[in-house]
Image (cartoon, helix red, strand yellow):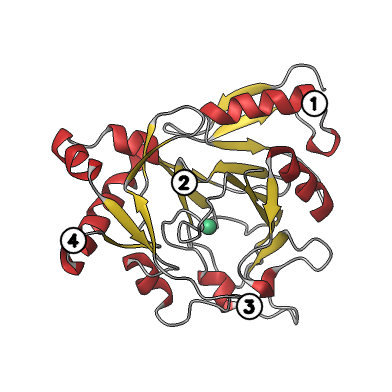
Amino acid sequence: MLGSPQLRPLGEALGTEALGVDLSRLDDETFAWIGNAFAEHPVLVFRDQKLGAADIAAFGRRFGVPRKHALVKYRHPEHPEVSWLTNVEEDGRVDWYGVKRATDWHTDSTYEEELPLLAMLHALEVPASKGGTMFAHMQAAYAALPAAMKERLAGLVGLHGRSSGPAGERLYGDDKGATERPYSELPRPAVVPHPVNGRPILFVNPMHTHGFVGVGRQAAWELIEELAAHSTQERFVYYHSWQVGDLLIWDERATMHRGAGDYHPQERRIMLRTIVYPN
Ligand SMILES: [Fe+2]
């Protein structure tokens, strides 16, 4: 350990910097400290890290099981549980799917049986300005809902599909990217307790939630949009401006995220990413 690691807030609602940690030589004591910090701070940033795909997979394995990404094209050849988040094709041209990918609010993979614990991104090349990633605190968003809405949501079960919600349709339409298998609809309660800290999470995201059990399509669509507008107000959001060497982890249950999609596409933006599931 490099002395005692410390926490420093980055944003009002969430976003916390972890100082004094070198993830390339992580000992058990420091990892325990990170685990405790992460339970309370759902977006943690480690600056000035220099990690390869193997290091990222190893850090992921400390938490659980890193999993191969659904989009085959972006998998790392030697470490398929690590994938590229890039706007550059192999021949150096702009990857337009990579540019627009994930640039609206979502929680990852809520249409799959098993939910991820967390995801991580490591910045290798970043635009000169902008090109950030945004996070919304879905526990803070839930806590701030009017009592009547909390009551309404208590009985609701959301229906999740792959990018089939209002934001998914707007962003991708019929061009959702090739996956190894098709996905069907999956029901999930609209409000869930956090498995570690127990606080309720608003678990509806406009990318993958496309309805609610027993609610007509139009009413459901409107509710999804209303909840998305509520939870992405500035007071619940942190915009992360990337620096090369940042390794950021986010809680996949307590937050939504999106690429800001606000940079010039000719500027290279390359990151390594992994997503981690419970053991
Ligand atoms: Fe995502």
- Left or right for 122, reference 134: right
| Disc 3 to disc 4, C-alpha distance | 41 Å
Between marks 4 and 1 in the image, the one whose residue lies nearer the viewer: 4
Q: Is label 3 in a helix, a strand or a loop?
A: loop
Residue under label 2: 135
Q: Tell me where residue 18 appears, x and y as whole percent.
A: 65, 29
Q: Type of residue at label 3?
A: Val
| Disc 2 to disc 1, C-alpha distance | 28 Å
Between marks 3 and 1 in the image, the one whose residue lies nearer the viewer: 1
- Left or right for 211, reference 1: left
| Disc 2 to disc 3, C-alpha distance | 25 Å
* Numbered mark located on residue 68 in the image: none
**Mark nearer the N terminus (3 vs 4):** 3
Between marks 2 and 3 in the image, the one whose residue lies nearer the viewer: 2
Residue under label 3: 94
**Mark nearer the N terminus (2 vs 1):** 1
In this rendering, is residue 252 above or below 15?
below
Between marks 2 and 4 in the image, the one whose residue lies nearer the viewer: 4
Q: Type of residue at label 1?
A: Asp
Q: Residue at x 69, y 64 (%)?
A: 84
In this rendering, is residue 171 above or below 66?
below
Q: Type of residue at label 2?
A: Phe
Residue under label 4: 215
Q: Tell me where residue 45 appears, x and y as whole percent.
A: 63, 37
**Quarter of the image holding residue 254?**
top left
Q: Residue at x 17, y 44 (%)?
A: 152
Q: Tell me where residue 61 appears, x and y as whole percent.
A: 74, 44
Residue under label 1: 28
